[in-house]
Amino acid sequence: MNCTYYTYVRNSNSDHTLANTVPEISIIIPTLNEEEHIGRLIRHLTDNDHQVEIIIADANSSDKTVEIAESLGAQIAKINQPSRPKQLNEGARLATADLLYFVHADTLPPKDYANQILSASADGKTFGSFRFRFDSDRKALRFNSWWTHLPIMIARGGDQSLFISRKLFDNLDGYSEDHIVMEDYDIIRRGKKLAKFQLLQDDVRVSARKYDENPYWQVNSSNFIIFTLYYLGVSPARLLRLYKKLIRHPKS
């Protein structure tokens, strides 16, 4: 795979680059045409008292995603074709911290996310996620969010973000690049065989844009169908084709 790297580190408390500073957390964000969200997310992530490293794994965006991210001090890995597991793995290869944190571009972790993740890590919890809530007041979506309070697999997902130690991530050989869909469930499923999964009791704020494009029942039923077929062993390629048929996607 052809990738181009821009390597410099941003200190959350400074506008200067600190090439020799080892960050406490490396944050990897996969992107494709996310200029609407990426600036807000990077500012949010760097507004804390900890040293963090922001890595954008971009799948050849045609908008200003990369330009905005670079202007805010992020590192950039450019990848020629969209593939979230490949993007996440390439970002992780660039990371220098012992803790990795994977975040979607249209989400906002809790303000003190770094404190919570570092505290969990200090207690020996090597991977886990937050719960989530939508950026919408619709009652039906609040019901969806409630399910993420439960420690069950069907309530997990990449939108909740994922923190994981570098050691465990390497032991798992990262994300399975065969899983072009459900890659987040796959890595959690495999990781739980080696370590205890920790559900942090705070919420990531998630975009409801998928529900703006599709009826509520259609998104939920599609998610359930794909989740069930995944557990039945249907191939990722077939799952992705079906998912694209079942619902409209905001960036399609």
Image (cartoon, grey):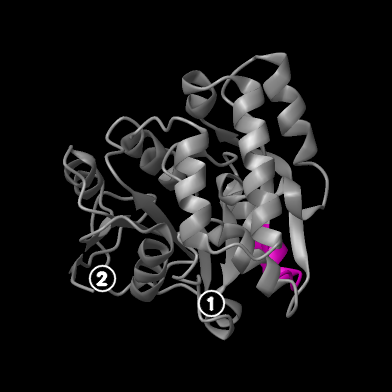
Going by the image, does 220 lie left or right of 15?
right
Q: Quadrant of the C terminus?
A: top left
Locate residue 80: give its quadrant: bottom left
In this rendering, the answer to whether 171 lies above or below 200 is below
In percent of width and height, residue 228 lies at 71, 52
Q: Which residues are magenta?
A: 118-128
Please report the residue visible at 41 percent of the width from the left and 39 percent of the height from the top: 41
Residue 126 belongs to magenta span: yes
Residue to which mark 1 is pinned: 166
- Residue lying farthest bottom? 171
**Distance from Cα at disc 1 to Cα at disc 2:** 20 Å
- The amino acid beneath tag 1 is Arg
- The amino acid beneath tag 2 is Ala
Locate residue 4: give its quadrant: bottom left
Nearest the viewer among 234 and 152 is 234
In percent of width and height, residue 3 lies at 20, 69
Q: Are marks 1 and 2 in contact (CB under 8 Å)?
A: no
Q: Quadrant of the N terminus?
A: bottom left
- What is the count of numbered marks? 2
Callout 2 crowding tier (Cα within 10 Å): few <14, some 14–19, many ≥20: few
Q: Is residue 131 visible?
A: no
Residue to which mark 2 is pinned: 19
Residue 29 belongs to magenta span: no
Nearest the viewer among 239 and 154 is 239
Please report the residue visible at 56 percent of the width from the left and 24 percent of the height from the top: 135
In percent of width and height, residue 34 lies at 31, 38
In this rendering, the answer to whether 148 lies above or below 151 is above
Going by the image, does 33 lie left or right of 85?
left
Secondary structure of the residue carrying numbered label 2: loop
Callout 1 crowding tier (Cα within 10 Å): few <14, some 14–19, many ≥20: many
